[in-house]
Amino acid sequence: MIEKIKSGDRRSIARAITYVESESLESEKLLDELFHLTGKAYRIGITGPPGSGKSTLTNALAKYYRKSDLKVGIIAVDPTSPFTGGALLGDRVRMTDLGLDQGVFIRSMATRGSLGGLSKKANEAADVLDAAGFDIIILETVGVGQSELDIAKTADTTIVVVVPESGDSIQAMKAGLMEIADFYVVNKADRPGSEQSVSAIKTMLQYRSHDESTFMPNVVKTVATENKGINEVAIEIQKHKEHQISHGKFHNKRISRIKEKIKEITEFKLCNLLWSSNNNAFMSEELNSPYQVSEKILEDFKMNLTKRS
Ligand SMILES: Nc1nc2c(ncn2[C@@H]2O[C@H](COP(=O)(O)OP(=O)(O)OP(=O)(O)O)[C@@H](O)[C@H]2O)c(=O)[nH]1
Ligand SMILES: [Mg+2]
């Protein structure tokens, strides 16, 4: 399977991502073996309020990169979460025209019922695509929850997409979206008010703390449905990438992504180990002060560990 993934076999890639989604034992072994093949792809996070045009932009950007023959992997975290409901689904862009292109791989991951660990899974799916030789990986998430923010944040470049409707940029700021942006896209610039949105964001940016090594986020206007402004988006991505590299931040971000990963895996395993011993029985027997019970559980756990070693 590793060999097949390396050679870009689509069925194996799809299967690997399914393993990742189900957190099966195979997935860990697989990801472990794929790890040394990762790190080549450039990861772009695209986030923003529901319906702002993230998928349309992703689509347009993918087509842009395809012109230079770069292979593009897309992971769309599906907005079937309780936050957005189904109201917008009818209006969603299905990236079907790209689906026929062998140089593009699209996978959507559902958020329903699996918000915890979603960022882990989305990043692991990106690892699979990375190992399979995709040059660009776009992670699209609706900017409504922490997990979605985490996904966008771990990308090499994070783009926040807003539309020129009143209050949208302010809402995005409230949702914590503004802090994670490496730059902004005001999409649907064919609608009135796009200039005001651009200046509102620029004004806000002045208050962001920065020093001489900070990449100052730009604001790019697009009409994703008409492919307008896509070049500018790509140029901005490149500018951000070069800035990160020349300031040593590119490498650092990747190192911290791996460290975060180590922490995540260890904590996950530790939790499993902890609750797989007979601590559940402990809890039902002694419903004293939760603080004392917790102390006892930890003591018990440490004792078990020393006994084992
Ligand atoms: N007028 C106009 N409409 C656009 C533009 N970009 C996207 N749309 C439309 O806006 C709607 C939502 O676009 P999507 O790309 O699905 O938005 P999204 O942010 O991916 O939506 P979710 O994933 O559901 O949050 C669709 O009907 C698009 O055709 C644009 O530049 N101008
Ligand atoms: Mg979408």
Image (tube, rainbow, N blue to C red):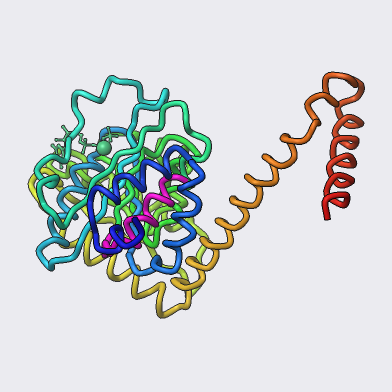
For the image, the number of numbered tags is: 0
In the picture, measured across the screen, residue 176 lies left or right of residue 195, that is: right
In percent of the image, x 48 and y 43: which residue is there? 176
Closer-to-camera residue (153/72): 72
* Position in image of residue 165 (x %, y %): 26, 34
Measured along the vertical axis of the image, is residue 224 above or below residue 174?
below
- Looking at the picture, does residue 289 appear above or below residue 122? above
At 18% from the left edge and 65% from the top edge, which residue is drawn? Answer: 70
x, y percent for residue 131: 35, 62
- The verdict on residue 129 being magenta is yes
Q: Nearer the viewer, residue 233 or 27?
A: 27
**For this view, does 23 lie left or right of residue 54?**
right
- Give the position of the C terminus as an image quadrant: bottom right
Quadrant of ligand 1 in image: top left
Choose between 254 and 52: the one closer to the eye. 254
Is residue 110 positioned above or below 75 on the image?
above
Q: Is residue 229 visible?
A: no
Residue 257 image point, x, y percent:
51, 60
Q: Residue at x 23, y 42 (%)?
A: 55
Magenta residues (range): 121-136
The prevailing secondary structure element of the residues shown in magenta is helix
Quadrant that contains the N terminus: bottom left
